[in-house]
Image (cartoon, rainbow, N blue to C red):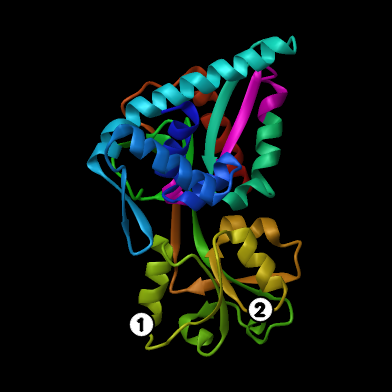
Amino acid sequence: MNLKQLEAFKAIMSTGSTIGAATRMGLSQSAVSRLLSQLEDALGFALFLRKKGRLMATPEAEELLTEVAGLVDGMQRIQRLADEMRVGRSRKSLLKVGVPTSMTQELLPRIVADFLKDHEDIVVELLTGSYDMIERAVLDRSADLGFVRLPTEMPDFDVEPVLHTEGVCVMPVDHPLSRHDFIEVQHLRNVPLVMLGRQRAVRTELNQMFRAANLTPQVRVEVHSVGAACSFVAEGLGVSIVNGLLASHFMHLPIVSRPFRPALPYEFGLAFRADEPRSQLVTAFADHLKQRLNLST
C-alpha cells in the first residue's frame, strides 16, 4: 500500500463517495476507484460494500480510519513543511475548516480575510460540501472544525450553537408569486421548483410539508448548494426554498425572497471532535467566525 491509496480511502470516508473523493483529490473518479481497489487488494479484505450504487463502509474500514487519518495528516504536514523549506518560507500553522459550498462564494472570504489580517502565520484550508460530509471531515480530522446544521446527523461532537434563521422562497423578480408577503406551501402547486439535494434532512422536512398539503412538488432542477439554487432561479427555471442566511448573500442576482410558511427553522453551529482539546488557533477562529456570522444576520 502507499500514501496515495490511503489518501483515497480517507477522502472516500470523508465524502461518502468516489465522486466526492475525486473532487477533493483533484483526480478522476476512475483513478480514485483504482486506488481503492489496490488498497483492498493489499489489505486482503473489502473496505466498502456496494449497495444500489452507493458505498457502505465496512466495520474494518471504520476501525482503520483513525490510524489512517493520523498517518495521512502527518505525511501531508511533512510534505507541506518540506515544500516550505525548499522555497525558503517559514513554517506556518494550518487551520482546516469545513463549510457548505455556498458560504465560500460571498460570506466566508470576507470573514477569513479579516482573520488573516491579525494572523499572518496561518494558512486556512477550506473543505466544502454537504453538511454530512463536513461532519465526517471533522470526525476523521480532515477539518479542525465544521459549520453544520443542528442537530447533527452523527453523534460524538462537541457543538457550539451559532445562529438561527428560517427558510425563504426565492424567485425571479418578476415572478407572479412575488406579489405575496409570504409564500405558503399551497402557493407552490404546479410551480416549477429548484430543489436542494434529495438526501438532505431539510428536503425530508419539505417533502412532509408537501404531503400534508396533498401537493406533489414539481421538481425541475436538483442542486446541492444554496448558491446554485439561487443562480438557477435567476435563470427563470423555477422557485426554490433555501435558508435565509445564505440566500441573503445572493440578492445581487435578479431574484427576490419571501418568508416561507409554515416556518422552516434552520439552526446552525460549529462542530468539533469531542475527544480532543482545541488548539488556541481553532478557538480563536471559532470565536471570530461566530462573531462575524451573528453580525451578518
Q: Which secondary structure, mark 1?
A: helix
Q: Quadrant of residue 177?
A: bottom right
Range of magenta residues: 115-133
For the point 36% across and 82% down, the residue is 211
- Looking at the picture, tell me which residue is in the foreground, 258 or 231: 231
For the point 58% across and 31% down, the residue is 288
Pointer 2 and pointer 1: residues touching (CB < 8 Å)? no
**Residue holding disc 2:** 237
Give me the disc on residue 72. Answer: none
- Looking at the picture, tell me which residue is in the foreground, 141 or 260: 141
105 inside magenta stretch:
no
Q: Which secondary structure, mark 2?
A: loop
For the point 72% across and 24% down, the residue is 117
Q: Is residue 121 left or right of residue 222?
A: right
Three-letter amino acid code at disc 2? Answer: Leu
For the point 39% across and 34% down, the residue is 140
120 inside magenta stretch:
yes
Q: Is residue 41 left or right of residue 236?
A: left
Q: Tag count in the figure?
A: 2
Can residue 230 be seen here?
yes
- Quadrant where the N terminus sits is top left
Q: Position of residue 187 (x, y in %)?
A: 52, 86
Q: Position of residue 216 (x, y in %)?
A: 43, 86
**Residue holding disc 1:** 211
Three-letter amino acid code at disc 1? Answer: Arg
Q: Is residue 38 left or right of residue 294?
A: left
